Every structure is written in C-alpha cells, then in structure tokens.
Image (cartoon, rainbow, N blue to C red):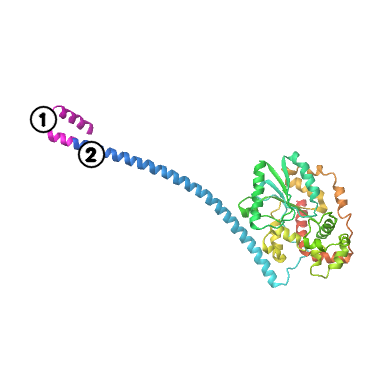
Amino acid sequence: KCNDTLGQIIMLIRHPSTSNTWTMLIGLSCLLISSIIIIQYKNQNKMIMSAKQNYKYQTSKKIQYATHSKRVLGLLHNTIEQTRITGKVFKQAVEQKQNKSMVPISNHVHQSEIFGIPNKVNREIFLYNRIPKCGSSTLLTLFNKMAAFSNYTSETSTVFLEQVLSDGNLQEFVEHLVQLQSKIDGRLVYDRHIHYVNFERFGYRNPIYFNMVRDPFEQAMSWYYYMFARQSFSFISAKQRATFTQKHKWKTYGKCIEEYRNTSFGLEEMCFLDEGLYAGWFCGHADECKDLDIGLPIAKQHIERYTLIGLTEELSLSLKALEKLIPSYFRHISEFDKNNARLNAALGSRNVYPAKKLVNFIKVKLKYSYEIYNFIKQKFHLTLRK
C-alpha cells in the first residue's frame, strides 16, 4: 500500500490540484511512518543479531566454565574421597593407639586381594619408586635392555636423597613426570628413590605402580655395608661424617649393633637402622606417616594400588609375575635375565652376619617393616597361585 501511495504522490506532484492536497498529505504521512517502521525494524534486527552473537559467546564461555568446573569438581571429589578413606584409616589407627599402648604386630597378615593393574590408571607411565638395597640395580639393567624390545623409554632420576617431599615439590614431581611422558609421546618407565606418591591428589590418573621389597633384616644389613663401602661419604650427613673414624668405617654390622643397642641414637645414627622404613615408604609424605602406628594401615591401603610388589629373594618369580601382569611392557623379560644365579649368590655374600641374638634383636626393632613385608609376601604368593 505504501508503494501505491508513493506512486500517487509522485503523480500529484507532477499534476497538482487543490482537491487532492489532503490525499498527498496523507500519502506523505504514510510514507514517513513506513520509513520510521523500516528504520526501527533494521535497528531491532541489529539488536537481535547482536543478542545472538552475545548469546553464542556467553554459551561458549559457560561451556568452557562448565568443563573447567567439572575438572575442578573431579579434583575436589578425589580429594574428598581420599581424605575420607585416609581419615577413616587414620581414625581407626588412633583408636587402636588409644586403646593400647602400641598397635600389636600380628604374626600373620590379613587376607588380601591379588596384585593386578587397577582400573583407571595411566598405562603410559610405569613408576618404580624403588627402596634402597632391594635389588633395583639388577632390575634397572633388565628394564634398560627391554626398552628397545618393548618400545618404551626408560628414565632414572638423578635425585637420590630427597625421598620425602613437601606438597609443592610433590606437585612438581607429578607434573614433571606427566610432561616427560607427553614429551616423549610414548610409554615411560621411570624410577626414583621416593615414597609413595598419589597422582590423583593433583588431578592426574595414577601410573602403574611397581616396587620390590627384601627381608627387612637383610635390607638393613646390606644398607649398612653399602654405606661403609662408599669411597666418598657424600650420602652421609655432616654430623654423621664427623663421627666416623677409619676404624669405625670397617666395623662389622654385628659390632655396631652390639655397641649401640642400648643408646637412644646409635642404631639410627651410627648403624643406619630405619625401624619403620617400609611402613613410611608406602605410607607416603604426610606428617602422620612419621607415627608408625598410624602410618602402618595407610601404607597397607596404598599397597593395594600397586600392580605388583615383588620379592628380592624370589626375583625369578617376580619377573614371571611382571610378564603376566604387564605383558605390554615386560613380555619375555625372564628370558632377558640370565644372571639370576649371580644375583642370588651375591645377596649377602660379602656381609658378615651378626650373632643370632643380635639378629633377633634387630628383627624386633624392625617389627613395622616385617608387618609390611609379610603383608606383601602373602599378597605376592597369592598372586602367583591365582
């Protein structure tokens, strides 16, 4: 209608007449109103388009925020769940400690599940948080030989003394390992002397955990002779280094135990005896791990997350178990090992054994480590039977 009116207006302009003045005015008014409507429509259309773009932007932001929130909530859930479980174990240990002067060290271990790869682990990272003097040198030689055969990268940490870390250093360690695996773009076998590390606490999936343990007395004696056989005392603190004399350097383990058994410091400072080594190692880095009564059940809980913990005294069977449980990494590893006899013969061959009464004395001191060792040993043999 506006177009028709516009045509009439043009005609009236060309052929004006007084009688049609009102018609022309009405037509001009109609045209003006139409123009205003069109302008408003265009402005409204611009506003709609702007609103759509803003909506898309806001939606994109919400999706990003939701994704980030989901990850944060996942972290929070893992932390809460871990705190709940650890808190439950912590509470039970405290109650036991309150009821008795000391948690009784059982003569047998409770029935446990067999070893195996847990669900939802990062199969691209194999972490061997090795305990000193438990046959790691032999294993690392085998792992290096297997690397090309099984298409993985084997890395050994150059850090030896920092075995217990702060929260900040723990996060750095976890992120370093994840980034290292991402950088090589393949499977990673990594080893370091370090207590158990929970990757989930920092928002990452746990790796494949592996370790080896040795009879606690044998490990303690081997560690003593290892330290004294060093040409350099770089592993020993300045306080200990100042105390050593050339004569004491070659003192047998039995003589050291005999001399310092009734002192409050000597067994740890001079004979390098760590009474709760295994319990603390598998418990982790938290302050409560220093209290062995509390750290012991936490350590057992963490052991359940390991794919395998082998026995140094049964290296051949440990390698067989490794083959079966993680064939993608260690298929035929037992065929690579042709020197088991040499290793087993070497275990303790250069160490001078103390008298039986001193051996029994040390074994009582190592009761927490024996609790963990027997727990692992039963789990290991149950795995072999299955």
**Residue drawn at (62%, 53%), measured in percent from left and top?**
202
Label number found at residue 17: 1
Question: Quick one: label 1, few (<14), some, or many (20+) residues within 10 Å?
Answer: few
- Please, what is the dominant secondary structure of the magenta stretch? helix
Instruction: Of the two numbered discs 2 and 1 on the same chain, state the one appearing first in sequence.
Output: 1
Q: Nearer the viewer, residue 5 or 247?
A: 247
Label number found at residue 69: none
Which residue corresponds to mark 2?
33
Q: In this view, does 312 lie to the left or right of 80?
A: right
Cα–Cα gap, marks 2 and 1: 24 Å
Residue 47 x %, y %: 35, 42
* For residue 216, above or below residue 192: below
**Residue drawn at (68%, 72%), measured in percent from left and top?**
98
Q: Which of 362 and 29 is in front in this view?
A: 29
Residue at disc 2, secondary structure: helix
Residue at disc 1, secondary structure: loop
**Residue drawn at (26%, 39%), measured in percent from left and top?**
37
Q: Which amino acid does label 2 sit on?
A: Ile
Q: Give the range drawn in magenta.
A: 1-27
* For residue 216, above or below residue 320: below
**Residue 121 can be seen in this image:** no
Q: What residue type is labelled 1?
A: Ser
Q: Is residue 216 left or right of residue 188?
A: right
Q: Which of 152 and 91 is in front in this view?
A: 152
